[in-house]
Amino acid sequence: MKTFTEKTYEVVRNIPRGEVLTYAQVARRVGNPKASRAIGTLMRKNYNPDIPCHRVVRSDGKIGGYNRGGAVKKTELLIQEGCEFSKRGTLILT
């Protein structure tokens, strides 16, 4: 049986390039809908480049943190992947 961490990393690893999931969406997909903060903690501690934690964002469209260069780097990566942002700088979630 997979641990919460293993399930989380599997979900995040499978987010396609140019798409994002919110912390809440990841929590629901791993079977614990109230674990958004725990998802954020795992993303903050992730340094494995095979797990694209930059593709996990806040539900309000704000970027959230990124441990490999901060919000600016996270935004740059998402723009390179084709994600769109509003004039206010929030991610356009579809």
Image (spheres, grey):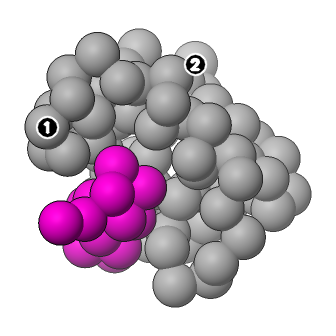
x and y, in percent, of residue 52 in the image:
50, 69
Mark 2 vs mark 1: give the one in front: 1
For the residue labelled by badge 1, is the local secondary structure a helix, a strand or a loop?
Answer: loop
Q: Give the residue drawn at x 71%, y 53%.
A: 45
Furthest residue in direction bottom, as rendered: 50
Residue 53: mark in rendering: none
Highlighted magenta segment, given as a residue range: 1-18
Q: Give the residue drawn at x 34%, y 49%.
A: 4
Q: Give the residue drawn at x 62%, y 82%.
A: 49
Residue 31: mark in rendering: 1
x and y, in percent, of residue 91 in the image:
44, 34
Furthest residue in direction front, as rendered: 1
Q: Are there few (<14), some (14-19), or many (20+) residues within 10 Å of tag 2?
A: few
Compare marks 2 and 1 and give the one earlier in the sequence: 1
For disc 2, the marked residue is 88
Q: Are there few (<14), some (14-19), or many (20+) residues within 10 Å of tag 1?
A: few
Q: Does the segment drawn in magenta span residue 42? A: no
The residue under label 1 is which amino acid type? Answer: Gly
Label 2 and label 1: CA atoms lie apart by 33 Å
**The N terminus lies in which quarter of the figure?**
bottom left
Q: Give the residue drawn at x 50%, y 31%.
A: 38
Depth check: 94 or 11 in front? Answer: 11
